């Protein structure tokens, strides 16, 4: 099968799957009925109290599209979702109550310090210079994030840390976004924070006249990327390990595996584009 | 070519074709579920299998990918003790905690009737809709499109606690209007306490005044709020604080 054939088939399969899923993700009323049925069974096993408390949370999550995202259109996942929220509520509600309702200094002090550290490290990752100036920016962003955290709906379908990290990072991103807007750097001199090296305007790979088997091009492309990135492609695609298994095999974190995977894909895409361009010349 | 190899090539081709196929640099709507996804990963889930639609978006959007990798890197660094410590002592000033509370006023009208009310001052609301995050100018790249206006708990009657949350977002259907939602959970702490429904919730904000009836705990939507009824004519500054009340009713 040619590359084009492989991609066309993949695209067709994806479209079919998407169509099957769309109807439910567009019908909040259907999900609402299913939630009520699940809440009834939850009430039978855990009591009515928890149901009274999580019903508004579930309905809010439904309005915000979180249930649709979690289930990706699969009705059999609604039960998992309700139980996940119930368990999240049981374990995290006292802490969230201390933070958001009681404004407890005892709960806030350690969290605020962590938030400042997260913000500081975020800026270091974005190549800000280590030191007091960056710390001041980090504290400003952590304070804005703390105010947001006080006022943001906690959905109980997630752990606390990822949720809080995202609030901090959004405040940091906002700072960078507004600083870039204000900066006097001419547009042509600005660089994106993300290494978006593939031109988004370029037509999709599948729409271009690719030649030859991916198999052939891939061997040559793989030879041109770093060993770690090549290993990740090998494990994830050809040995069908999942990211966690790959992380164990390579002695790295799962986050590092995702980073290596995306960088490897980006490298391969660039190399394959170049090979194709050369063939077209 | 073996079937396994063919499948691997097909999957790889799919991913290569999707890479950065999304348009623009804004974070797509899927950004709102990043915490769910990262939570799943921390619990050993493989997102390509568990959340294929999100994974597809992750390939398509460089902005989403960057946000995803940043969160994961930050959490992993903290958990493995690899965070760079702050160069000097962390700030311990928690003054941001003050000024956000909206103490309730409870009026006992008779043995079975009560009214709980809350007020958010103009200053408090302006802090929520600070100039850079006015609701109708929210930046989709970095802004939660929802705003929590009020979140409080009150003991309305003996053994009856109300957990109240009022939030808003831009209305989908009408331009220049806000959709406001009230979440209400009722906790009965004694066997003798009775659920107090129906309840009437009233929201007054600038020229806007509407009521809704609650027949059970859950979530209700107020009629949409035209921005002109709460902002100045240029839609730059909020004009007034808001009042929310919840009361027992026989209707």
Image: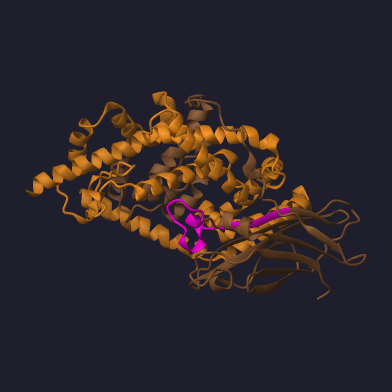
Residue pictured at 28% horizontal, 41% vertical: A266
**What colour scheme governs how the chains and residues are painted in the rendered image of this protein?**
by chain
The tint of chain B in the picture is brown
Of B209 and B79, nearer the camera is B209
Of A207 and A172, nearer the camera is A172
Residue pictured at 29% horizontal, 40% vertical: A265
Left or right: B182, with B251 as reference point: left
Left or right: B16, with B157 as reference point: left
Left or right: A262, with A93 as reference point: left
Of A19 and B27, nearer the camera is B27
Is residue B151 covered in magenta? yes
Residue pictured at 58% horizontal, 73% vertical: B229
Where is residue A27 shown, x and y percent of the image?
A: 54, 66
Q: Is residue B97 above or below residue B147?
A: above
Where is residue B212 shown, x and y percent of the image?
A: 70, 72
Instruction: Identify the residue at the far right of this view.
Output: B111
Magenta-tinted stretch: B131-152
Residue pictured at 50% horizontal, 43% vertical: A166
Residue A244 figure quarter: top left
Residue A75 visible in the displayed image: no
Residue B224 visible in the displayed image: yes
Of B69 and A58, nearer the camera is B69
The tint of chain A in the picture is orange
Where is residue A24 shown, x and y percent of the image?
A: 52, 63
Instruction: Identify the residue at the far left of this view.
Output: A281
Q: Is residue B154 above or below residue A250?
A: below
Where is residue B173 shown, x and y percent of the image?
A: 50, 72
Q: Is residue A127 above or below residue A212?
A: above
Left or right: A10, with B147 as reference point: left
């Amino acid at each position: 099968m040619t590359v084009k054939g492989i991609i066309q088939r993949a695209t067709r399969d994806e479209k079919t799957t998407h169509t099957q899923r769309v109807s439910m993700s567009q019908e909040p009323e259907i999900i609402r009925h299913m939630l009520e049925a699940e809440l009834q069974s939850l009430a039978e096993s855990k009591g009515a109290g928890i149901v009274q408390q999580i019903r508004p949370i579930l309905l809010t999550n439904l309005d915000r599209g979180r249930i649709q995202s979690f289930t990706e259109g699969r009705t059999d996942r609604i039960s998992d979702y309700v139980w996940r929220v119930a368990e999240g509520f049981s374990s995290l509600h006292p802490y969230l109550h201390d933070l958001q309702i009681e404004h407890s200094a005892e709960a806030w002090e350690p969290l605020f310090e962590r938030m400042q550290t997260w913000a500081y490290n975020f800026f270091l990752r974005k190549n800000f210079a280590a030191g007091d100036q960056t710390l001041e920016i980090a504290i400003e962003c952590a304070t804005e994030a703390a105010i947001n955290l006080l006022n943001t709906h906690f959905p109980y379908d997630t752990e606390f840390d990822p949720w809080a990290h995202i609030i901090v990072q959004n405040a940091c991103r906002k700072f960078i976004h507004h600083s870039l807007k204000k900066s006097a750097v001419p547009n042509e001199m600005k660089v994106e924070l993300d290494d978006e090296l593939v031109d988004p305007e370029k037509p999709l790979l599948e729409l271009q006249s690719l030649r030859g088997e991916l198999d052939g091009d891939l061997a040559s492309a793989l030879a041109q990327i770093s060993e770690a990135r090549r290993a990740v492609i090998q494990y994830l695609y050809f040995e069908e390990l999942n990211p966690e298994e790959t992380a164990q095999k390579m002695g790295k974190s799962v986050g590092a595996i995702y980073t290596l995977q995306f960088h490897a894909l980006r490298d391969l895409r660039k190399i394959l584009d170049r090979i194709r361009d050369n063939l077209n010349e | 070519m073996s079937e396994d190899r063919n499948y691997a090539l097909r999957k790889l081709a799919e991913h290569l074709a999707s890479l950065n196929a999304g348009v623009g640099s804004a974070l797509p709507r899927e950004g709102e579920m990043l915490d769910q996804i990262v939570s799943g990963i921390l619990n050993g889930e493989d997102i390509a299998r568990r959340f294929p639609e999100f994974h597809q978006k992750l390939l398509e959007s460089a902005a989403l990918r960057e946000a995803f990798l940043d969160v994961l890197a930050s959490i992993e660094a903290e958990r493995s003790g690899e965070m760079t410590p702050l160069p000097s002592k962390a700030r311990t000033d928690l003054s941001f905690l003050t000024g956000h509370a909206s103490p309730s006023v409870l009026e006992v009208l008779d043995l079975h009737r009560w009214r709980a009310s809350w007020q958010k001052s103009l200053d408090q609301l302006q802090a929520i809709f600070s100039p850079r995050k006015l609701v109708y100018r929210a930046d989709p790249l970095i802004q939660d499109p929802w705003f929590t206006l009020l979140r409080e708990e009150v003991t309305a009657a003996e053994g009856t606690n109300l957990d109240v949350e009022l939030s808003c977002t831009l209305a989908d259907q009408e331009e220049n209007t806000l959709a406001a939602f009230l979440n209400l959970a009722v906790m009965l702490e004694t066997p003798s306490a009775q659920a107090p429904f129906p309840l009437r919730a009233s929201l007054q904000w600038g020229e806007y005044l509407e009521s809704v009836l609650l027949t059970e705990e859950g979530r209700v939507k107020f009629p949409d709020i035209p921005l002109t009824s709460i902002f100045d004519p240029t839609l730059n500054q909020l004009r007034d604080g808001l009042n929310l009340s919840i009361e027992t009713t026989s209707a």
